[in-house]
Structures are given as structure tokens and as C-alpha cells.
Image: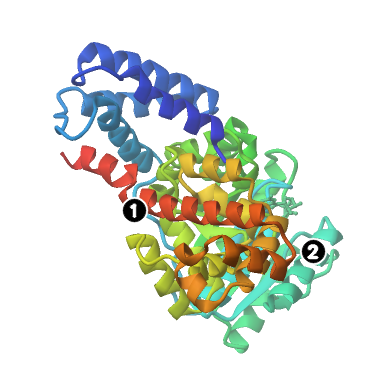
Amino acid sequence: MFDNLTERLSGVMKTLRGEARLTESNIQDALREVRMALLEADVALPVIKVFIEQIRQRAIGHEVLDSLSPGQALIGIVHQELIAIMGGEKNELNLNVTPPAVILMAGLQGAGKTTSSGKLAKWLMAQKKKKVMLVSCDIYRPAAIEQLELLARQTGAEFFPSQTDQRPAEICSAAMDYARKHHLDVVIVDTAGRLGIDEAMMQEISELERLLKPVETLFVVDAMQGQDAVNTAKAFADALPLTGVILTKLDGDARGGAALSVRHITGKPIKFAGIAEKLDGLEPFYPERMASRILGMGDVLGLIEDAQRASDQKEAERLMKKMKSGKGFDLNDFAQQFQQMKKMGGMNAMLEKMPHQLTQAAQNMNVDEKIINRSEGIINSMTPQERAKPELLKASRKRRIAAGSGVSVQEINRLLAQFEQTRKMMKMMNKGGMSKMMRAVKG
Ligand code: GDP
């Protein structure tokens, strides 16, 4: 996700290397780099303009703390402005109405409306303990109704059936009657999309909006469309009283233009991001964490949350403690991490959220699933003492373990080296650039 942008923005620090402080002229050079990075990322021009101007104003006369280089100070400011341009605080879904709360899904065909409806149902059931019903008003594509029905079955949400010979308004009224009668908490209404902005589509969805009075009207948009996504968003925001945006397919978005532009252009917050095709690939959108990810600082909190979802509470707390302190991390934890990795959607999903440098380090270490399984085998062949105290592992013990797990002693050495690397990574995360950079801004 956003690899180029991350690369380019970390390059900005280099332009300031050797400078003692931020001055008007060196800021100018650095801002030129930031601007280029944003242009390449396909960020909308008005957004770039505002963004650069804000940074310039904050950077000039900004006092650089002794412990920071001007590069770090500037990145700190960029971090704050990235957060601001993506909406500042995280925006919660509003469900504070007499149930059933209606969520109306709007957007073009292929944006990910139906998939996101299913994902949102799953999220609301799992995270908010809501009783959710899905209903489709896409009377033009029978396949879309079937797709939603399948998603309802997969998630365990209620499904309100609809047919292609019904009118959307009629379907919605009947669905609402049913939801009230059965005391459901949330009704998610999937609507028909078109390939492009189209008057009839807008009228139809506006009519549904007036009829349903949804507490949330969410515009679903494909992040990979870049500036096109932003233009479509603008058209929908002008025609409908949107309350928020779901940005889908962020996992395939190499550039980041839509993520950075859509809030500013529509004035509506991004509430969720789609990060994978599968049903749990939807996350609340946190501008702060996204900004950290874009700057290659990683989304450590996101990683911990994934771990919490994947494991029981106690285990998650233990892991969090160790990740924070970096102390007492042994081979038992290392083996535990392999289990966690598998539950957290595998290596790739995790690497996305690690700080940029660590991701590269991990890629260099060439960790793939097969190696993970082998490593588990090796650790299983160790005694509890050896797992708790890896320094016990001298040559003769290694030979025994090698024979026990059917690998060579070299492989055991490789595993131990990886373990050391991981332990180091944790220390890095712990002391990491992040807190240092944050101080730049507070100064
Ligand atoms: P709709 O026409 O707006 O209802 O779009 P769909 O929900 O049918 O989605 C279109 C395609 O995008 C499907 O193949 C989905 O699996 C895929 N998709 C939706 N959201 C995401 C996402 O966040 N990540 C990825 N990788 N694929 C997605």
C-alpha cells in the first residue's frame, strides 16, 4: 500500500540532511519534494495546494528541538498535516437512533458496495453485537441480489429477499416493516450502481434516501481509481446528503491519491477502509494510523488490534506487554507468534502494517509460510528450558534438535538468527522513530 509515496516522503528527510535548522530556503526545497511525491501519488491538485501551504506555514519559524534533525522535524509536521487532511479524528459510525438504524450504501458499479455491505454486517455483528439485516435494491442485476444473499449466509446476517420486478421503494418499505417487527438493530440497504454518474441512478437513490431517512448514507468508492474516485465522490456528495465514505481496495492501491483527497474534496469523513477481498477485510479508518503508515512508521496499534482479534484476550495482553517492552521475549513467544501470524491473515497482511524498514528487513529474511511451519517443528523439538533460554542451545543440543525435527543444524542456526532479529525489531519498534518524530510536532 502506498509504497511509492512512503519512499518519496522518506526521501524528503534526506534533502535536509546536514542542515542545522529549518529555513525558508531549505523548506522550499523539501516542499518541492513533498509536492512531487503527492503529484505522483495522484492526489487532487486543490488538496496538494492546501496541504503544502499548511506545512509551509507551520514549518517556517518552527523551533526544532535539539534532539531532532530538521528532516525529522519536517516529517513530524507532514505527519500532522496528513492526519488533518484525512479528517483528524477517527469518525465513528452513528447508530444513535431508535432502531432499526438504516445504513444506505451508494456508489458506482464495481466500487465494492455489495461486498462492503456484507463486511459491514459482519463487523457490526462481531464488534458492536448488533442484529443486522441486509437488503438489496439492485433490481437491475439479479446476480447482485444473489451475491448479497450469499454474503448474508456467510456472515450470519438476516437477509430480506427482493425480486427484480419490484420497485426499490417498495422493497425498502417492506424491509423496514420486517425489521421493526423483528426488533433488528441495523438494516444495510445495498443499492444499484451504474458504470458512471447517471441522472436516473441519482434520482433513484435520492428517492430512497428521502424514504428511508438513513442515519448513515455511505459513499463506497474504489481507492484504485485515484482522481476519478475523487470526482465521482464529489458528484455523489453534491446530489446526496452523505454522512461518510467507505474507501475500498486500499490493498491494491499503490499510490494513495484517493485516500488523501476524498475527505477534503467531499467534506465527508472516511469511516471505513476495505483492505482485502475477504469478509473481515474492512477496518475503521484512523487518519492518524494511516498517516503513520504512509510515512513508513507503521501501524503498530493496528497490528496489536489484529492480534487481539486473532487471539484470546489474555494472550493478546501478554503479547502487547512484550511488544511494548521488548523484554523477556523467548522462543515460546516466537512460536506463539507463528500461530498468531497465521490467524492474522498471514505474513503479507502483517507486513503491510509494520514500519517500512522492518517490512524490508522481514522481506530480506524471506519468511514464508513453509518456513514458518518448519520453524514451528524445530521449536517443538526443544525442551521447555531451551525455549525459555535460547542461549542454552550449544552444538550438541542443536544436533539433537536437528535429528528430532529432521532438519540440518544450519537451519536451526537460521531460526535462532531470525529470533534474534525479531527481538531486535521489537526493541526498534519500542524505541522507534515514531515517538521521536511525534516530539517534533509537540515542540
Ligand atoms: P458493487 O458493484 O459496488 O456491489 O461491487 P462488488 O461488491 O461486487 O465488488 C466488486 C469487486 O471488488 C469484487 O470482486 C470484490 O471482491 C472486490 N472488492 C471489494 N472490496 C474490496 C477490497 O477492499 N479489496 C479487494 N482486494 N477487493 C475488493
Q: Is residue 386 left or right of residue 147?
A: left
Which quarter of the figure is the C terminus placed in? top left
Residue that extends furthest to the front in the rendered view of this protein: 396
Q: Is residue 206 above or below residue 318?
A: above
> Mark 1 highlights which residue?
430
Quadrant of the rendered structure where residue 374 is? bottom right
Q: Is residue 211 above or below residue 159?
A: above
Q: Residues within 10 Å of mark 1 (few under 14, many from 20)?
A: some
Q: Position of residue 170 (x, y in %)?
A: 72, 70
* Residue for point 33% across, 33% down: 78
**Secondary element type, mark 2:** helix
**Lower sequence index among marks 2 and 1:** 2
> Mark 2 highlights which residue?
147
Quadrant of the rendered structure where residue 134 is? bottom right
Q: Kindly tell me whether mark 2's CB lies below 8 Å from ligand 1.
A: yes
* Residue for point 65% across, 52% down: 410
Q: Position of residue 229 (x, y in %)?
A: 60, 37
Q: Is residue 97 visible?
A: yes
* Residue for point 56% across, 46% down: 362
Q: Is residue 191 visible?
A: no
**Secondary element type, mark 1:** helix
Q: Kindly tell me whether mark 1's CB lies below 8 Å from ligand 1.
A: no
Going by the numbered disc 2, the residue's amino acid type is Gln
Q: Position of residue 197 (x, y in %)?
A: 67, 39
Q: How is the image coloured?
A: rainbow
Query: Residue 419 or 410: which is nearer the viewer?
Result: 410
Q: Position of residue 243 (x, y in %)?
A: 47, 55
Q: Residues within 10 Å of mark 2 (few under 14, many from 20)?
A: some
Q: Is residue 81 above or below residue 41?
A: below
